[in-house]
Amino acid sequence: MLDFKVVKTFHTQSPQDLEAISLGLLKLFKERSLLLLEGPVGAGKTELVKALTQCLGIQETASPSFAIHHHYANRDVSMDHVDLYRLESEDDLESTGFWDLFGAKKGLVVIEWSDRLNQDLLPLNWHKIKVQIEKLPAPNERQVTVLVQG
């Protein structure tokens, strides 16, 4: 089982706070990084991905809920965004090319609903960062916990 340690916990009050979190996440990335996003429907996982891509200089992003996978790139970075919400079993991943994403020499793979996947099957040679987002009672408030493997 993967072992993670808490790096930082944030309390956000608006979607704009996600930009600061994204900038912090950028400092944690290595050549091969997996960003594992967890949280309930409407917690802000896709909003965090949008904030992250903006920080990376990638303008076009969309939730891959129906397509399962989107690829974004600019001249400096390549990012694969996977949404496992509609995943019914891990066998569904075989037909999406999911496992092929880890053949790259470098890159960033962002997985929404990563808790639907047996994370022990993820490649050992990729740096793993987990972000857990919890809704708080106030409408736009969230608690965002960033953890790293190790």
Image (spheres, helix red, strand yellow):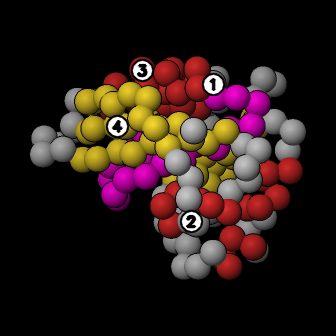
Q: Quadrant of residue 55?
A: top right
Distance between the alpha carbons at the discs numbered 4 and 2: 20 Å
Q: Nearer the viewer, mark 2 or mark 3?
A: 2
Q: Amino acid at mark 3?
A: Ala
Relative to 90, residue 138 above or below: above
At which x and y percent is residue 118? 58, 66
Disc with the residue nearer the chain's start (2 vs 3): 3
Distance between the alpha carbons at the discs numbered 2 and 3: 28 Å
Range drawn in magenta: 29-48
Q: Is residue 31 magenta?
A: yes
Q: Residues within 10 Å of mark 1 (few under 14, many from 20)?
A: some
Disc with the residue nearer the chain's start (4 vs 2): 2
Q: Amino acid at mark 4?
A: Val
Q: Mark 3 sits on what residue?
A: 20
Disc with the residue nearer the chain's start (3 vs 4): 3
In this view of the protein, which residue sits in the foreground, 13 or 132? Answer: 132
Disc with the residue nearer the chain's start (4 vs 1): 1
Distance between the alpha carbons at the discs numbered 4 and 1: 20 Å
Q: Amino acid at mark 2?
A: Leu
